[in-house]
Amino acid sequence: PPPYRLIAVFLGLLCVVSLTGFIIQSVYCNGFLHVNQSQSSLPRRNELDDLSANYSALAAAHEKLVEEKEELKRENERLLSLNTDINLKEIQSPERLCKLCPQDWEFFQSKCYHFSTGRLSWRDSQADCRSQGADLVVIDSRLEQLFISRQSKGGSYWIGLSDAASEGTWLWVNGARETGGYWMPRQPDNHRGREDCAMIASRAVRNWNDEECGRTLSWICEAE
């Protein structure tokens, strides 16, 4: 065949080969870009999932705190509504009129209570009460809890409750077992594994908290 025909055929084959190579390269590049984009977006998706989970946890915690706040508010309202009744019972009691309690002790429902001004450990507080013919206070009724909460005026005081003998088994100093009580929300928690003695820490009705027995606080003695 004439030379120009061979040249034309050669050029045609060259174009076909070039076009085929271009197509293959384009397909490869598109695939590579797609894979690369997918891989680069994976950490962002994981981060978004983590943020979403954290938000859900925070929202749940916030809702729980709101519920606890409302419960404490209702308890405080009940405490205020009962204060008048407690005062009347205390004032009208014959024992109160006869001043059966020692000086600086408070009378309530046939018992005497001393709210200390000093600070001692739980065990030393109990020893001080014993030296006066009393014990750390044993709270065995809602009315007594309301009285103690009011008279404490928001201070921190030891009460006669401990689980030092057996973790999780709360016993009063008279040997009675406490199975309910007026614990603060999420208490007792035995923080750091060393909180074995009970205290009150506010004027709210649910104001019990577990604390390290060696901490020095004021205390409440109770005598029959």
Image (spheres, rainbow, N blue to C red):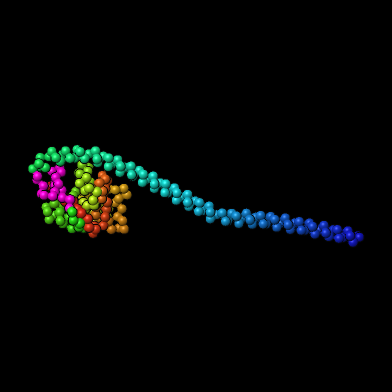
Residues in magenta, as a range:
99-116
Residue 98: where, in percent of width, then height? 8, 43
Q: Is residue 147 left or right of residue 38?
A: left
Q: Nearer the viewer, residue 1 or 42?
A: 42
Residue at 45 percent of width and 49 percent of height: 55
Q: Is residue 35 left or right of residue 183?
A: right
Q: Is residue 199 left or right of residue 9?
A: left
Q: Is residue 109 magenta?
A: yes
Q: Nearer the viewer, residue 187 or 172?
A: 187
Find the residue positioned furthest to the bottom.
3
Q: Quadrant of residue 12?
A: bottom right
Residue 134: where, in percent of width, then height? 13, 51
Residue at 70 percent of width and 57 percent of height: 25
The vertical placement of 213 against 91, above or below, is below
Residue at 17 percent of width and 50 percent of height: 115
Residue 185: where, in percent of width, then height? 31, 48
Find the residue positioned furthest to the right.
2
Q: Is residue 175 magenta?
A: no
Residue 35: where, in percent of width, then height? 61, 55
The vertical placement of 17 against 86, above or below, is below
